[in-house]
Amino acid sequence: MTADRDSSELLRVIVRRPTKAVAEQIYQFAEQICDWDSLLGLADEHRVLPMLYLRLQDVNPPIPLDMQERLRVGYHRNMFHNLANAAELIRVLESFQHEMIPAMPFKGIVLGASAYQDLTRRPAGDIDLIIHHRHLGKATSLIKERGYELKTQTQGDGTPFEDCYEYHFERQTDGMVLEIRWRLVLTQPRFRRNLGMDWVWPLRRTVMVAGAEVPDMSPEITLLTLCMHGSKHVWCRLIWICDVAQLLASSPGLDWNEVVREAGKTGLWRSLALGVLLAHRFADAEVPQAVLRRFESDATVRKLTQYIVENLFDAPGSAPEGGVPYYVKLLGFRDRVRMVMSFDYLRPNEHDRAVLPLRGPLSPLYYLIRPFRLFRDRTPR
């Protein structure tokens, strides 16, 4: 949807760190809202309706009665949905534990409980779990026993396709959605890193969710996962930027040296830098000055940050135009080399053959021509 200026300005200010000055700004911007339907629609699109409701409650600006009711109903609907998700998550984890299947929940209600200290403050669409691939068959059976249907297409023998990294389940009786993954991905699957349970499980902690203790990623791994997810989707929702800011606020003992080191090792350095700079710009996230300077010294990250700041509400999910695709800009040097050298990337296709028909012994020259053809196609004219 097209964002009107008053709505986008109010959403920008509600995600900032609470201060007296920010409260006054929220009141002033709320007074200027003429199209409350547009505001609520934009807040819902960016998944910050609960936050909008709570921040407006704090400052109590004049709001039309029907909009007050819509905000209240929306907040309580989200609260009930999250509590239902929490109860289901606990039951699924118990069934997995009984069969000795380790599972790591992430995003959603677990993030709400750990980073926001309140699982009702953040919308949670579905239940996300990471497991070892070797447990996929048994985990699938247990989930189906709970009334879920597997919606992900599989091969004839029932196993996932090579580039598949998650199973999507839905339960028709109550609309519950659950996804299990065995690998986290940054961008396109062919450039993937094998980040899964071996990455998230060893440094796990626990968090209380609806009175039960459940596994939770360490703050350092959570930060990298949030930045990976937001960067994958070009930070098209404000809530993903808020997630990073809330995590930083709730983790004063975060080991920045470890985060930066792990980001470099896993190819997530630019994703981390982009997410942290966005959280700092939008939500006043407190970041050590040395870390900020290091992230801001990267010209590519600096330009991407500025573009998203300027276009989040008017063109969410868009990326700057130019000769290098967005997902390539996020990759470090070693990953770019790996991408260029990958067989799939260099394999000639019909576009290369259309540019220059080669036959017989000249056909191998396509592998030399293809990089130049791709560069030409990516370069603005």
Image (cartoon, rainbow, N blue to C red):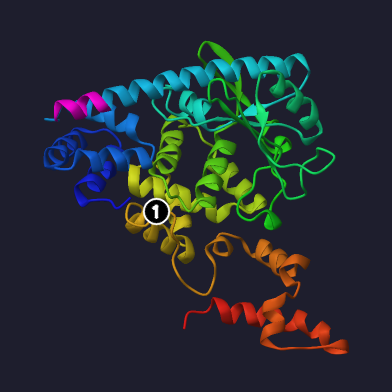
Numbered disc total: 1
Residue plotted at (48% across, 56% down): 294
Residue 39 in the image, given as x and y percentages of width and height: 25, 41
Q: Is residue 124 left or right of residue 44?
A: right
Residue pointed to by mark 1: 316
Q: Is residue 172 left or right of residue 100?
A: left
Q: To which quarter of the image does residue 73 belong? A: top left
Residue plotted at (29% across, 53% down): 2
Residue 120 in the image, given as x and y percentages of width and height: 41, 22
Residue plotted at (23% across, 23% down): 69
Q: Which residues are magenta?
A: 64-70
Nearer to the camera, 130 or 161: 161
The stretch drawn in magenta includes residue 53: no
Q: Is residue 8 placed above or below 326 in the rendered structure? A: above
Residue plotted at (38% across, 42% down): 46
Nearer to the camera, 311 or 42: 42
Nearer to the camera, 325 or 39: 39
